[in-house]
């Protein structure tokens, strides 16, 4: 970020967090402003110039404030933001978690969407854990048959995952639902709508009142994505069966899954300019625990 660019951005920022930044960093901001005004006039600044190292520190603090405001954190001082960041991150995650639980308890099927590896599946497992429910994961569906049970060679019937979820009140996770075949989704739509499923043997299974359906994907289901170009946009009838919620990448989850190794993993990801995600923190944490070299592991595991 250039000096003039920072000043220009600050002029447009009116949120409380930026006002805190402007107040506590007023001396540095005034130096920048005087320098820019002098440059515009073609004159020599009448005051000292903010050193480049100090400017870079100022930008880093600004970026932290910008991220905090974006996440909805409220703080009265910059030190409060830094000192309470972990607690603020936890509150942000917990608020999202409680909102999701309210959606589920309201009887909705929940669709979580966001960037790959950001913890959607981990989040679904946490829901199952807190609700003390069995978790069943459907990874792909190409046809209606993927949602129906089958008989083995001896004629014994094996229930499908959705049949088991309906029968036993389990948590059914539909992984990467925006990649499912449209024909399979038509069948899924009808099952979710009617509230029961009929097996190939003719058994009618009503949806258990404790059954939870959580679908995950990388798109909002309705808008084509250049980033995830192979994902499908889904017909409105199917999309309407879900309460669709965007899930950001929670730094709290990154810390939680990597534990004592968070700092060194975080530093390595930042050094390589790679994406922070639950998946990346989990994988690098596993590598460290296996005794693998972090640099070697980062090169092999970080692809984003």
Image: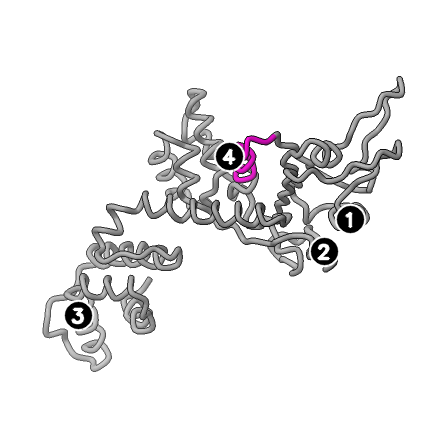
Left or right of 148, for residue 135: left
For mark 1, does the 10 Å Cα neighbourhood hold few (<14), some (14 to 19), or many (20 or more) residues?
few
Residue 102 versus residue 158 in the image, above or below: below
- Residue of label 4: 130
The secondary structure making up most of the magenta span is helix
Marker disc for residue 30: 3
Q: Position of residue 78 (x, y in %)?
A: 22, 55
- Label 1 and label 2: CA atoms lie apart by 19 Å
Q: Are marks 2 and 3 in contact (CB under 8 Å)?
A: no
| Label 4 element class | helix
Q: Position of residue 286 (x, y in %)?
A: 46, 26
The residue that appears at 29% across and 62% down in the rendered structure is: 17
Left or right of 127, for residue 142: right
- Residue of label 1: 194
| Label 1 element class | helix
Is 140 or 126 nearer to us in this picture? 126
Q: Looking at the rendering, in which quadrant would you find the N terminus?
A: bottom left
For mark 3, does the 10 Å Cα neighbourhood hold few (<14), some (14 to 19), or many (20 or more) residues?
some
Closer to us: mark 4 or mark 3?
4
Q: Position of residue 32 (x, y in %)?
A: 20, 69
| Label 2 element class | loop
């Amino acid at each position: 970020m250039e000096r003039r660019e920072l000043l220009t951005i600050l002029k447009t920022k009116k949120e409380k967090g930026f006002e805190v930044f402007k107040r506590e960093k007023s001396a540095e901001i005034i130096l920048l402003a005087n320098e820019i005004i002098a440059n515009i006039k073609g004159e020599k600044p009448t005051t000292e110039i903010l050193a480049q190292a100090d400017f870079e520190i100022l930008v880093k603090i600004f970026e932290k404030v910008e991220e905090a405001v974006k996440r909805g954190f409220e703080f009265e001082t910059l030190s409060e933001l830094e000192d309470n960041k972990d607690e603020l991150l936890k509150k942000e995650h917990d608020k999202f978690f409680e909102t999701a639980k309210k959606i589920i308890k309201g009887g909705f099927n929940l669709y979580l969407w966001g960037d790959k590896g950001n913890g959607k599946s981990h989040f679904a497992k946490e829901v199952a854990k807190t609700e003390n429910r069995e978790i069943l994961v459907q990874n792909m569906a190409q046809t209606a048959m993927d949602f129906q049970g089958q008989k083995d060679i001896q004629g014994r019937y094996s229930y499908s995952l959705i049949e088991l979820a309906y029968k036993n009140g389990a948590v059914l996770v539909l992984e990467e639902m925006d990649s499912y075949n449209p024909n399979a989704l038509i069948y899924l739509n009808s099952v979710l709508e009617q509230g029961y499923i009929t097996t190939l043997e003719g058994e009618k299974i009503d949806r258990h009142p404790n059954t939870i359906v959580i679908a995950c994907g990388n798109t909002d289901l309705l808008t084509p994505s250049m980033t995830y170009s192979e994902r499908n946009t889904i017909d409105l009838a199917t999309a309407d069966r879900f309460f669709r919620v965007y899930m950001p990448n929670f730094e709290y989850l990154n810390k939680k899954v990597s534990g004592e190794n968070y700092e060194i993993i975080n530093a390595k990801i930042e050094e390589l300019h790679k994406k922070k995600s639950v998946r990346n923190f989990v994988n690098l944490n596993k590598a460290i625990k296996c005794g693998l070299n972090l640099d070697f592991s980062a090169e092999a595991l970080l692809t984003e």
